Amino acid sequence: MRQLADDVFQIPLIPRDGINAYLLGDTLVDTGIPPSGKKLAKELGSRIQRIAITHAHGDHMGGAKHLKHALGVPLLVGAKDAEPARTGVPETKLGAFGRVTAGFPGVEVDTELAEGDTVGDFTVLETPGHSSGHISLWRERDRVLVAGDVFFNMNIFTTMPGLRQPFGPFTFDPERNRESERRLVELEPSLLLLGHGPPITGAAEKLRAFAAKELS
């Protein structure tokens, strides 16, 4: 676990920042694949008072059911991802293959998050596209942005870092995701934290370069 800002910690769940979770104060953001749930419960235990999920895919909420039951904490999910979270069946464009490869143990959702809600000292932003209910978390005072899979900061095949579009087959609506990307670029974050790839400092400049190449 590595501290990145005031009350903000990165938790790499597999090597080379391949899958990340984050601890924001006492809120765990994302839970990785199912085996990560036991690891997170053991390592963080009572530090976790709630779980917030950026989107209902198996590499982000695979460990949520175990953690919720083991720790007795509430689960918070974007409203339009609440049904996939409960069933364990994600939105993908890959039919049965996608349901198997991105599926996870379904779990009851305690709070359905919407634009403008607060999670600790972060504000919920609705950033759909990768999934219909994808959310990001924004702290304006120091411009920290947790953006799930709106962007990737790695090539999933080579693990080389670098900003890029999220993996296409699991992005339900690429055009809506590009709209969400444009919105987040305009925030000019100083620190960008993503589900895949290392943290990005000086993020505003790097996002502008990404937008000029990918979103113009």
Image (cartoon, rainbow, N blue to C red):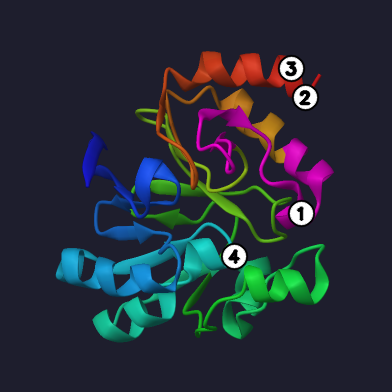
Whether residue 5 is visible: no
State which mark lies toward you, 1 or 4. 1
Residue under numbered circle 1: 169
In three-dimensional space, the C-alpha distance between marks 4 and 3, rounded to whole angstroms, equals 27 Å
Amino acid tagged 3: Lys
Whether residue 173 is visible: yes
Q: Nearer the viewer, residue 98 or 1?
A: 98
State which mark lies toward you, 1 or 2. 1
The image position of residue 168, as x and y in percent, is: 75, 47
Q: Residues within 10 Å of mark 4 (few under 14, many from 20)?
A: many
State which mark lies toward you, 4 or 2. 4
Q: Write the residue at 75% across / 72% down.
A: 97
Q: Residues within 10 Å of mark 1 (few under 14, many from 20)?
A: few
Q: For residue 171: magenta?
A: yes
The image position of residue 129, as x and y in percent, is: 74, 50
Secondary-structure class at tag 1? helix
Residue under numbered circle 4: 57
Residue 13: numbered disc: none
Q: Write the residue at 48% across / 71% down.
A: 62
Q: Residues within 10 Å of mark 3 (few under 14, many from 20)?
A: few
Secondary-structure class at tag 3? helix
Secondary-structure class at tag 2? loop
Quarter of the rendering containing residue 5: top left
Residue 215: numbered disc: 2
State which tag comes first along the sequence, 4 or 3: 4
Q: Which residues are magenta?
A: 152-179
The image position of residue 214, as x and y in percent, is: 75, 24
Q: Is residue 14 above or below residue 210?
A: below
Residue under numbered circle 3: 213
> The C terminus lies in which quarter of the figure?
top right
In three-dimensional space, the C-alpha distance between marks 1 and 2, rounded to whole angstroms, equals 19 Å
